[in-house]
Amino acid sequence: MEYVMGIDAGSTYTKGVLMNLDKEIVAMDVTLTGANINAAADQIRKKLLDKSGIDENKVKLVVGTGYGRYVIRFGNFQVTEISCHARGAHYLFPNTRTVLDIGGQDMKVIKVNEKGDVTDFVMNDKCAAGTGRFVETIIKSFGLDFKAANDYALKSKRGISLTSTCTVFAQTEAMEHLAIGDAIEDVLYGVFKSVMVRAVGLIQRVGLTPELTFTGGLSLNPVAVRILESLLKTKVNVSNMTMYAGAIGAALYGVEKLLTEEFIG
């Protein structure tokens, strides 16, 4: 059996998937990207081989995607993260027609057809507000991690509205709410809601066609998903694998190349 490795080198996390030519995932892992993208990708490569017990000679292609895809020195070729997230979301949820991806440094909404091919997309501006980094910055300023922040936000009785769109100003605004006695759970709920409100605005620009699949690390946050479903009044597809959608899509493109010896991306 031959295999393909898909590596999604994001600005915050690097994710990897090892897939056989039957499009079955045999291993996956994630690590912090840090300052050295190639080192993070190489760490993922080794983890996937160790987890699967597969000889590296059986891995015929390594496909890179994400923010740092061109830095992966052992990669065979690269595919845009938009194409990979579309294909990966469709793999996880075949009825996907709209994909919301919130990464560390950007937010994008992708329309896909019944094959998982991109038909339209829109991205946010370069401001960090509305991204995973935005949420992480504020949470860290509270001395919390994502799990603790989610646990607090789940207890919110009334979410605080954050009006600032800049990360720095929003962080200051959040701290000011705490200073005047607002509950931390209400402030944190407001942080997650401010991101989801931006996401809904982006979705409305291309139009929502069910089913909607939410990818990226923030898709693992139950509060964010709950708020998104409430704002859109529709079910949102998520799973413990949606943060790997980009890497899955990259691996699928690699399988396609090996099976057809022709790549269109």
Image (tube, helix red, strand yellow):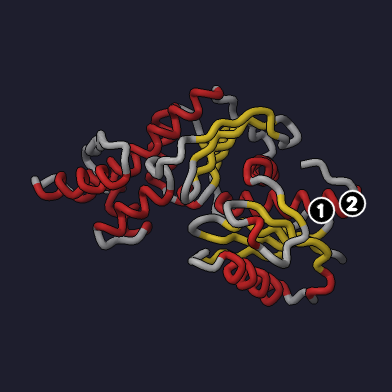
Label number found at residue 255: 1
Under mark 2, the amino acid is Leu
Separation (CA) of disc 1 from disc 2: 6 Å
Under mark 1, the amino acid is Val
Label number found at residue 159: none
* Residue 211 seen from this side: no
Percent across and percent down for residue 86 are 65, 40
Residue lying farthest to the left in this orientation:
180
Of residues 150 and 32, which is closer to you in this image?
32
Percent across and percent down for residue 254 are 79, 53
Q: Which residue is mark 2?
A: 259
Percent across and percent down for residue 241 are 59, 53
Percent across and percent down for residue 13 are 52, 60
Q: Residue at x 89, y 51 (%)?
A: 259
Occupied quadrant, residue 146: bottom left
Locate residue 242 relative to residue 249 in the image: left or right: left
- Mark 1, Cα crowd under 10 Å, few <14 / some 14-19 / many 20+, is many
Labels 1 & 2 near each other (Cβ < 8 A): yes
Locate residue 1 relative to residue 166 in the image: left or right: right
